[in-house]
Protein backbone atom coordinates (compact mmCIF):
# COMPACT_ATOMS: atom_id res chain seq x y z
CA UNK A 1 0.00 0.00 0.00
CA UNK A 2 1.34 3.43 -0.93
CA UNK A 3 2.44 5.38 2.10
CA UNK A 4 2.83 2.29 4.34
CA UNK A 5 6.31 1.18 5.44
CA UNK A 6 6.72 -2.15 7.24
CA UNK A 7 9.85 -3.39 9.00
CA UNK A 8 10.22 -7.04 9.97
CA UNK A 9 12.51 -8.28 12.73
CA UNK A 10 14.66 -9.93 10.06
CA UNK A 11 15.22 -6.66 8.17
CA UNK A 12 18.71 -5.12 8.61
CA UNK A 13 18.80 -2.14 10.97
CA UNK A 14 21.58 0.31 11.73
CA UNK A 15 22.77 -0.20 15.30
CA UNK A 16 25.35 1.24 17.69
CA UNK A 17 26.50 -1.30 20.28
CA UNK A 18 28.30 -0.19 23.42
CA UNK A 19 29.37 -2.28 26.39
CA UNK A 20 26.45 -0.94 28.46
CA UNK A 21 23.78 -0.07 25.87
CA UNK A 22 22.70 -0.31 22.26
CA UNK A 23 20.85 2.06 19.94
CA UNK A 24 18.87 1.02 16.86
CA UNK A 25 17.62 3.40 14.19
CA UNK A 26 14.00 2.32 13.54
CA UNK A 27 12.81 5.06 11.18
CA UNK A 28 13.62 8.56 10.02
CA UNK A 29 11.90 11.25 7.98
CA UNK A 30 13.16 14.71 7.13
CA UNK A 31 15.10 15.58 10.30
CA UNK A 32 13.20 13.39 12.78
CA UNK A 33 14.65 10.04 13.92
CA UNK A 34 12.93 7.25 15.87
CA UNK A 35 15.25 4.90 17.75
CA UNK A 36 15.18 2.06 20.25
CA UNK A 37 17.66 2.31 23.11
CA UNK A 38 18.40 -0.71 25.28
CA UNK A 39 20.38 -0.18 28.49
CA UNK A 40 21.84 -3.19 30.24
CA UNK A 41 21.35 -3.81 33.99
CA UNK A 42 23.48 -1.84 36.43
CA UNK A 43 24.51 0.65 33.74
CA UNK A 44 24.68 4.41 33.41
CA UNK A 45 23.91 6.40 30.27
CA UNK A 46 24.24 10.11 29.61
CA UNK A 47 22.25 12.67 27.72
CA UNK A 48 24.59 15.49 26.78
CA UNK A 49 23.52 19.03 25.86
CA UNK A 50 23.16 19.40 22.11
CA UNK A 51 24.87 22.07 20.04
CA UNK A 52 21.49 23.00 18.54
CA UNK A 53 19.26 24.57 21.24
CA UNK A 54 16.15 23.66 19.20
CA UNK A 55 16.93 19.92 19.44
CA UNK A 56 14.26 18.00 21.36
CA UNK A 57 14.89 14.45 22.53
CA UNK A 58 11.88 12.44 23.75
CA UNK A 59 12.18 9.19 25.74
CA UNK A 60 9.32 6.78 26.45
CA UNK A 61 10.01 3.89 28.82
CA UNK A 62 8.92 0.63 27.23
CA UNK A 63 10.38 -1.65 29.87
CA UNK A 64 12.09 -1.30 33.25
CA UNK A 65 12.78 1.72 35.45
CA UNK A 66 15.00 4.74 34.82
CA UNK A 67 16.52 6.71 37.69
CA UNK A 68 17.35 10.27 36.62
CA UNK A 69 19.96 12.03 38.77
CA UNK A 70 18.96 15.62 39.57
CA UNK A 71 20.52 18.12 42.01
CA UNK A 72 17.41 17.98 44.20
CA UNK A 73 17.39 14.17 44.23
CA UNK A 74 16.81 11.23 41.94
CA UNK A 75 13.54 10.83 40.03
CA UNK A 76 12.45 7.30 39.07
CA UNK A 77 10.31 6.75 35.98
CA UNK A 78 8.57 3.45 35.24
CA UNK A 79 7.16 1.62 32.22
CA UNK A 80 4.68 3.82 30.36
CA UNK A 81 6.17 7.08 31.65
CA UNK A 82 8.28 9.51 29.63
CA UNK A 83 10.45 12.60 29.63
CA UNK A 84 12.03 14.90 27.08
CA UNK A 85 14.88 17.38 26.99
CA UNK A 86 14.96 20.70 25.15
CA UNK A 87 17.65 23.34 25.67
CA UNK A 88 19.53 21.11 28.12
CA UNK A 89 22.38 22.99 29.80
CA UNK A 90 24.12 20.21 31.73
CA UNK A 91 24.70 16.47 31.14
CA UNK A 92 21.87 14.30 32.45
CA UNK A 93 22.71 10.96 34.07
CA UNK A 94 20.32 8.01 33.88
CA UNK A 95 20.87 4.85 35.92
CA UNK A 96 19.29 1.51 35.00
CA UNK A 97 19.58 -0.91 37.92
CA UNK A 98 17.68 -3.71 36.19
CA UNK A 99 17.99 -2.58 32.58
CA UNK A 100 15.58 -0.49 30.50
CA UNK A 101 14.21 -0.20 26.99
CA UNK A 102 13.39 3.27 25.69
CA UNK A 103 11.66 4.58 22.62
CA UNK A 104 13.88 7.52 21.68
CA UNK A 105 12.67 10.22 19.27
CA UNK A 106 14.96 13.08 18.20
CA UNK A 107 13.71 16.14 16.33
CA UNK A 108 17.10 16.45 14.57
CA UNK A 109 19.31 13.73 13.02
CA UNK A 110 21.65 12.30 15.67
CA UNK A 111 22.22 8.65 14.82
CA UNK A 112 25.02 9.08 12.28
CA UNK A 113 26.76 11.55 14.59
CA UNK A 114 26.59 9.12 17.54
CA UNK A 115 27.72 6.25 15.35
CA UNK A 116 30.77 8.19 14.24
CA UNK A 117 31.41 9.60 17.73
CA UNK A 118 31.50 6.27 19.54
CA UNK A 119 31.48 3.53 16.94
CA UNK A 120 35.19 3.04 16.23
CA UNK A 121 36.28 3.01 19.88
CA UNK A 122 33.41 0.75 20.91
CA UNK A 123 34.41 -1.72 18.23
CA UNK A 124 38.02 -1.59 19.41
CA UNK A 125 36.87 -2.15 22.99
CA UNK A 126 34.77 -5.14 21.89
CA UNK A 127 37.74 -6.61 20.03
CA UNK A 128 39.91 -6.06 23.11
CA UNK A 129 37.26 -7.88 25.14
CA UNK A 130 37.65 -10.91 22.89
CA UNK A 131 41.33 -10.93 23.84
CA UNK A 132 40.75 -10.16 27.51
CA UNK A 133 37.27 -10.30 29.08
CA UNK A 134 38.50 -8.45 32.18
CA UNK A 135 39.38 -5.32 30.17
CA UNK A 136 35.96 -5.24 28.48
CA UNK A 137 34.01 -5.21 31.76
CA UNK A 138 36.64 -3.25 33.70
CA UNK A 139 36.00 0.06 31.89
CA UNK A 140 32.30 -0.08 32.69
CA UNK A 141 32.94 -0.73 36.39
CA UNK A 142 35.59 1.99 36.63
CA UNK A 143 33.20 4.47 35.01
CA UNK A 144 30.51 3.56 37.56
CA UNK A 145 32.91 4.03 40.48
CA UNK A 146 34.11 7.35 39.04
CA UNK A 147 30.54 8.65 38.82
CA UNK A 148 29.85 7.74 42.43
CA UNK A 149 33.07 9.46 43.53
CA UNK A 150 32.22 12.55 41.46
CA UNK A 151 28.82 12.78 43.15
CA UNK A 152 30.39 12.38 46.59
CA UNK A 153 33.00 15.13 46.07
CA UNK A 154 30.52 17.29 44.13
CA UNK A 155 32.58 17.57 40.95
CA UNK A 156 30.97 20.25 38.73
CA UNK A 157 28.61 18.69 36.22
CA UNK A 158 30.35 20.31 33.25
CA UNK A 159 33.41 18.14 33.97
CA UNK A 160 31.50 14.85 34.12
CA UNK A 161 31.36 14.07 30.40
CA UNK A 162 35.14 14.10 30.12
CA UNK A 163 35.61 11.69 33.02
CA UNK A 164 32.84 9.40 31.71
CA UNK A 165 34.59 9.06 28.35
CA UNK A 166 38.09 8.82 29.81
CA UNK A 167 37.15 6.17 32.40
CA UNK A 168 35.11 4.03 30.00
CA UNK A 169 37.86 3.94 27.37
CA UNK A 170 40.98 4.33 29.56
CA UNK A 171 42.27 0.84 28.70
CA UNK A 172 41.32 0.72 25.02
CA UNK A 173 45.03 0.85 24.14
CA UNK A 174 45.39 -2.69 25.54
CA UNK A 175 44.15 -3.86 22.14
CA UNK A 176 47.76 -3.46 20.98
CA UNK A 177 49.26 -5.51 23.84
CA UNK A 178 50.11 -9.08 22.72
CA UNK A 179 47.59 -11.68 23.93
CA UNK A 180 50.20 -13.78 25.69
CA UNK A 181 51.30 -10.74 27.73
CA UNK A 182 47.79 -9.43 28.43
CA UNK A 183 46.60 -12.78 29.80
CA UNK A 184 49.80 -13.93 31.50
CA UNK A 185 48.92 -15.15 35.04
CA UNK A 186 52.48 -14.98 36.38
CA UNK A 187 54.68 -11.94 37.00
CA UNK A 188 55.67 -9.97 33.91
CA UNK A 189 59.33 -9.54 32.99
CA UNK A 190 60.74 -6.08 32.24
CA UNK A 191 60.04 -6.22 28.50
CA UNK A 192 56.49 -7.48 29.02
CA UNK A 193 55.82 -4.76 31.59
CA UNK A 194 57.12 -2.17 29.11
CA UNK A 195 54.56 -3.41 26.56
CA UNK A 196 51.73 -3.22 29.11
CA UNK A 197 52.70 0.29 30.25
CA UNK A 198 52.48 1.49 26.65
CA UNK A 199 48.68 1.03 26.73
CA UNK A 200 48.32 4.38 28.55
CA UNK A 201 49.86 6.36 25.69
CA UNK A 202 48.11 4.24 23.05
CA UNK A 203 44.75 4.88 24.75
CA UNK A 204 45.51 8.61 24.91
CA UNK A 205 46.39 8.78 21.21
CA UNK A 206 43.15 7.05 20.23
CA UNK A 207 41.03 9.21 22.53
CA UNK A 208 42.69 12.44 21.38
CA UNK A 209 41.63 11.73 17.79
CA UNK A 210 38.05 11.08 18.89
CA UNK A 211 37.38 13.30 21.89
CA UNK A 212 40.23 15.82 22.12
CA UNK A 213 43.24 16.50 24.32
CA UNK A 214 41.43 16.90 27.67
CA UNK A 215 39.86 13.42 27.62
CA UNK A 216 43.10 11.93 26.29
CA UNK A 217 45.19 13.49 29.10
CA UNK A 218 42.81 12.23 31.79
CA UNK A 219 42.92 8.67 30.46
CA UNK A 220 46.70 8.77 30.07
CA UNK A 221 47.12 9.59 33.78
CA UNK A 222 45.23 6.65 35.29
CA UNK A 223 48.48 4.91 36.35
CA UNK A 224 50.22 8.05 37.61
CA UNK A 225 50.77 8.37 41.36
CA UNK A 226 51.15 11.40 43.65
CA UNK A 227 54.74 10.50 44.60
CA UNK A 228 55.88 10.21 40.97
CA UNK A 229 56.24 6.41 40.97
CA UNK A 230 53.52 5.90 38.35
CA UNK A 231 53.67 5.81 34.57
CA UNK A 232 53.95 6.73 31.72
CA UNK A 233 55.38 10.17 32.66
CA UNK A 234 56.12 9.87 36.37
CA UNK A 235 54.35 13.16 37.11
CA UNK A 236 53.47 14.11 40.68
CA UNK A 237 50.69 15.58 42.82
CA UNK A 238 49.14 18.67 41.23
CA UNK A 239 50.58 17.77 37.83
CA UNK A 240 47.94 15.04 37.75
CA UNK A 241 44.46 16.34 36.98
CA UNK A 242 41.71 15.79 39.54
CA UNK A 243 39.93 13.58 36.99
CA UNK A 244 43.12 11.56 36.52
CA UNK A 245 43.41 11.10 40.29
CA UNK A 246 39.79 9.94 40.46
CA UNK A 247 40.29 7.33 37.74
CA UNK A 248 43.54 6.18 39.38
CA UNK A 249 41.66 5.28 42.57
CA UNK A 250 38.67 3.77 40.76
CA UNK A 251 40.97 1.75 38.49
CA UNK A 252 43.01 0.42 41.42
CA UNK A 253 39.86 -0.41 43.38
CA UNK A 254 38.47 -2.51 40.55
CA UNK A 255 41.84 -4.13 39.80
CA UNK A 256 41.97 -5.33 43.41
CA UNK A 257 38.35 -6.45 43.81
CA UNK A 258 37.37 -7.91 40.42
CA UNK A 259 37.72 -11.64 39.80
CA UNK A 260 40.03 -12.81 37.02
CA UNK A 261 40.35 -16.29 35.52
CA UNK A 262 43.54 -16.95 37.49
CA UNK A 263 42.83 -15.10 40.77
CA UNK A 264 39.85 -14.16 42.91
CA UNK A 265 39.39 -10.49 43.78
CA UNK A 266 39.87 -9.11 47.28
CA UNK A 267 36.90 -8.14 49.48
CA UNK A 268 36.06 -4.43 49.15
CA UNK A 269 36.89 -3.75 52.79
CA UNK A 270 40.42 -5.13 52.31
CA UNK A 271 40.92 -3.17 49.07
CA UNK A 272 39.83 0.08 50.69
CA UNK A 273 42.23 -0.48 53.59
CA UNK A 274 45.03 -0.90 51.05
CA UNK A 275 44.04 2.37 49.34
CA UNK A 276 43.96 4.09 52.74
CA UNK A 277 47.46 2.81 53.56
CA UNK A 278 48.75 4.68 50.49
CA UNK A 279 46.61 7.78 50.96
CA UNK A 280 48.66 10.91 50.43
CA UNK A 281 51.65 9.04 49.01
CA UNK A 282 50.15 7.43 45.90
CA UNK A 283 46.45 8.30 46.02
CA UNK A 284 44.58 11.56 46.61
CA UNK A 285 43.23 11.61 50.20
CA UNK A 286 40.01 13.33 49.09
CA UNK A 287 39.27 10.52 46.62
CA UNK A 288 40.21 7.68 48.97
CA UNK A 289 38.05 9.17 51.74
CA UNK A 290 35.15 9.45 49.29
CA UNK A 291 35.50 5.76 48.38
CA UNK A 292 35.59 4.76 52.05
CA UNK A 293 32.44 6.82 52.76
CA UNK A 294 30.64 5.31 49.75
CA UNK A 295 31.45 1.82 51.03
CA UNK A 296 30.29 2.63 54.56
CA UNK A 297 27.03 4.03 53.12
CA UNK A 298 26.41 0.82 51.16
CA UNK A 299 26.91 2.49 47.76
CA UNK A 300 29.86 0.22 46.89
CA UNK A 301 30.23 -2.27 45.37
Image (cartoon, rainbow, N blue to C red):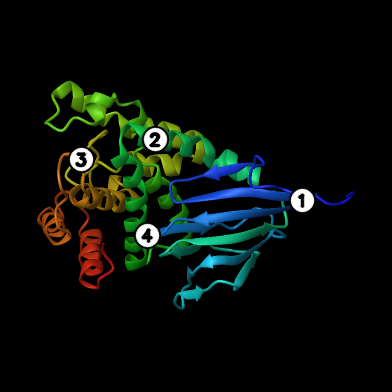
Q: CA distance from mark 1 to mark 3?
A: 48 Å
Give the side of residue 211 with respect to residue 266, left or right: right
Which residue is drawn at the image coordinates 23% and 31% (left, top)?
183
Mark 3 and mark 4: span between their CA atoms? 27 Å
Dot placed on the residue nearer the N-terminal end, 1 or 3: 1
Q: Earlier in the sequence, mark 2 or mark 1?
A: 1
Density class for disc 3 (Cα within 10 Å; few <14, some 14-19, many ≥20) is few
Kindly report which numbered mark, 1 or 3, lies closer to the viewer in this rendering.
3
For label 3, the residue is: 261
In the rendered image of this protein, does residue 293 appear above or below residue 179? below
Residue 291: give x, y in percent of width and height: 24, 62
> Residue 284, located in which quarter of the rendered image?
bottom left
- C-alpha separation, residue under disc 2 versus residue under disc 3: 28 Å
Q: CA distance from mark 2 to mark 1?
A: 34 Å
Residue 76 to residue 53: above or below: below
Kindly identify which residue carries mark 2. 204
The residue tagged 4 is 147
The residue where tag 1 is placed is: 31
Q: Position of residue 297 (x, y in %)?
A: 24, 73
Helix, strand or loop under label 2:
helix
Location of the C terminus (image quadrant): bottom left
Task: Find the distance from the CA under tag 4 to the CA under tag 1.
Answer: 33 Å
Q: Seen in the image, is 17 located left or right of residue 52?
A: left
**Foreground tag (4 vs 2):** 4
- From the viewer's side, name the closer residue of 126 and 221: 126
SS class of the residue under badge 4? Answer: helix
Residue 196 in sight in this render: yes
For the point 88% across and 50% down, which residue is it? 1
Percent of width and height locating residue 138: 31, 46
| Relative vertical location of residue 13 with respect to residue 38 in this rendering, above or below | above
Amino acid sequence: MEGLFIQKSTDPQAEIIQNDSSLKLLAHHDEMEIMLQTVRPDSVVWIAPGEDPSLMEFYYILQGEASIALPEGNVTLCEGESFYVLGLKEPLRIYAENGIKLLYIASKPLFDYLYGYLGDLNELLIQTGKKDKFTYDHGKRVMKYCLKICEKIKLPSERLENIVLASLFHDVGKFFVPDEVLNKPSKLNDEEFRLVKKHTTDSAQLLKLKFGQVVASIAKQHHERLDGTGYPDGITADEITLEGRIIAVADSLDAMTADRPYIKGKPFEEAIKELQSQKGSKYDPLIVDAVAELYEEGQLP
